[in-house]
Amino acid sequence: MASGSSTVKSVEITLLDSTPARLPSGTLFGGQTRYATYTAAALAAGALIKMIRCQKGEVVVGGRVYWEALGANTVITVGTTDSTNRFMTICPTVAASDNGQPSADHAPTGLFNVFAGIGYEFTAAGDILIACNDQTFTGALKMVAHVLHAGAA
């Protein structure tokens, strides 16, 4: 990803970071399954999109990303600030994710697909983010992540 890239926030993280803080819907952003959205209007090349906030001790056990067709030559990864492909390797987004199912041209599924990332435990509060390559794009992205607190049954 490009150095000096810009960082933007999902609707849900924008609420958490506002002054005064406003809580996103507990049905969408609480508990073990979290859902976040971001719609890009000519998002800058190399941008990072903070999608889901995790607290210390939370463990990522899976997830999926959905997207509209975001333009020619665009790719995304999913990770954390220190490893932008911790959960999902490079996925081309020229075609919509088709609700996460491969299309006839074998579009990516959008599943968190890096085995080493599944089971990652946050040692401090942090965000799951989408990292964009060096292409400007426009369109909607949605993420569902499944997180557990360490020691939870």
Image (cartoon, rainbow, N blue to C red):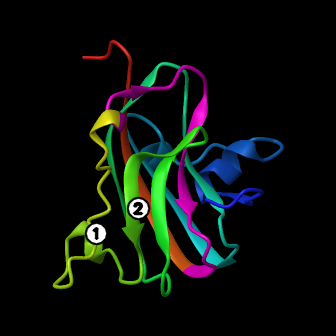
The spot of residue 107 in percent (x, y) is 27, 76
Mark 1: which amino acid? Pro
Q: Is residue 67 left or right of residue 138?
A: left
Q: Would you say residue 24 sits in the magenta stretch?
A: no
Residue at 52%, 62% in the rendered image: 37
Q: Is residue 51 left or right of residue 32?
A: right
The correct choice, above or below, for 13 with respect to 140 in the image is above
Residue at 59%, 38% in the rendered image: 82
Residue at 45%, 63% in the rendered image: 142
**Rendered image: mark on residue 90:** 2
What stretch of residues is rendered in magenta?
117-138
Residue furthest top as drawn: 151
Q: Quadrant of residue 17?
A: top right
Disc 1 is placed on an element classified as loop
- In the rendered image, the quadrant that contains the N terminus is bottom right
Q: What residue would you read off at disc 1?
A: 108
